[in-house]
Image (cartoon, helix red, strand yellow):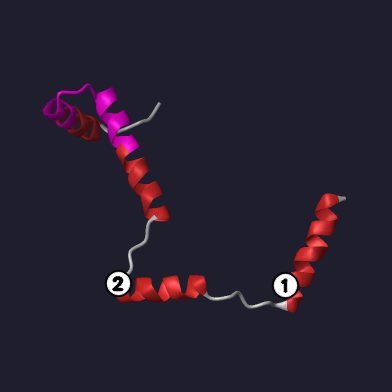
Amino acid sequence: MVRVTREQLDLFKDAADLQGQTVSDFAVTTLIAKAHDVMAEQRVFRVSGERWEELLARLDERPTVRPNLADALRMHSKRVSQ
């Protein structure tokens, strides 16, 4: 249950009526759309063509070996597998 003010409820009713929906249906479809937008913002990023090419080039580069990081990963793997 969500508590809203009278003014908010009136706004929701008016908007739902304009969409030919009940307030409940309007609320659910609006929340779903917003949730999809929020999730997409976390998964999608935009870059210019030049920056995209730079990103692809970096992804194609051979990774840099960092001995301390490799040691830490080995130690962690041993502890987790015990």
Q: Nearer the viewer, mark 1 or mark 2?
A: 2
Q: Secondary structure at mark 2?
A: helix
Residue at (72, 72) in percent of width and height: 69
Residue at (60, 74) in percent of width and height: 63
> Label 1 crowding class (10 Å Cα cut-off): few <14, some 14-19, many 20+?
few
Give amino acid for label 1.
Answer: Leu
What stretch of residues is rendered in magenta?
15-32
**52 vs 45, nearest the viewer:** 52
> Of the residues under marks 1 and 2, which one precedes in the sequence?
2
Residue at (21, 31) in percent of width and height: 12
Give residue 69's mark: 1
Give amino acid for label 2.
Answer: Gly
Give residue 49's mark: 2
Farthest residue, direction top: 22
Q: Residue 32 at what x, y percent from top left?
A: 34, 35
Q: Is residue 8 magenta?
A: no
Above-or-below relation of 23 to 58: above
Q: Secondary structure at mark 1?
A: helix
Principal SS element in the magenta part? helix
> Label 2 crowding class (10 Å Cα cut-off): few <14, some 14-19, many 20+?
few
Q: Is residue 29 magenta?
A: yes
Q: Residue 48 at what x, y percent from top left?
A: 30, 71
Quote the CA–CA distance across marks 1 and 2.
Answer: 33 Å
